[in-house]
Image: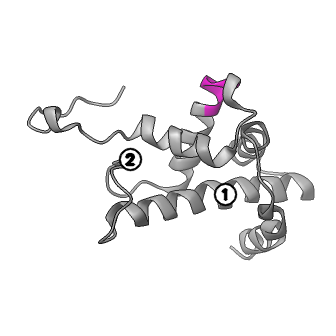
Amino acid sequence: MKRLLWVVALSWPLAGHAMDGKQLLNACRLLLREQPVLSPDESVQAGLCGGYVGGIWELLDYLRVSKNPAGGLFCPPDRVQPIQAVRVAVRYLEKHPDLLRYRASQQVLRAFQEAFPCPSPANQNRPEEPAG
């Protein structure tokens, strides 16, 4: 746990610049890598991914459930784990390589919207279909 806190603390200054989808995808692939041993630079990048995607998730989820929500941005099921949010972002970025040059925050929001769409008013009375 202490190692994770150091990774997040060390990557904090890196979060100040705008990141594109390609940079985020590379960082998140490190976080999801099967190898448990990462170099110090890779650890910082992996921590950057976790903090970036997790921060966007927390902000958007807060807006979704607050008294003054920003609208139906996305509608996840209860108890989505942070690593699941990273996997959703990586799948979306890999599926849309043509969008990697754009801001990562926009792509993460689109990933959440695609993975966790809100029911349209016409579909609210229909039973939910299982996610594929």
Q: Is residue 95 highlighted in magenta?
A: yes
- Residue 21 or residue 7, whichever sits in front: 21
> Do we see residue 107 in this rendering?
yes
Residue type at mark 1 is Tyr
Q: Is residue 56 highlighted in magenta?
A: no
Residue 119 percent across, percent down from the top left: 24, 39
Instruction: Give the mark toward the camera: 2 or 1.
Output: 2
Please tell me the numbered disc located at residue 21. Answer: none
Residue 103 percent across, percent down from the top left: 70, 43
Residue 107 percent across, percent down from the top left: 60, 40
Residue type at mark 2 is Phe
Residue for badge 2 = 74
Q: Secondary structure at mark 1?
A: helix
> Up-down: is 109 above or below 127?
below
Q: Name the quarter where the N terminus is drawn.
A: bottom right
- Residue 120 or residue 93, whichever sits in front: 120
- Mark 2 vs 1: CB contact within 8 A: no
Q: CA distance from mark 2 to mark 1?
A: 18 Å
Q: Earlier in the sequence, mark 2 or mark 1?
A: 1
Magenta residues, as a range?
A: 93-97
Residue 132 percent across, percent down from the top left: 37, 25
Residue for badge 1 = 52
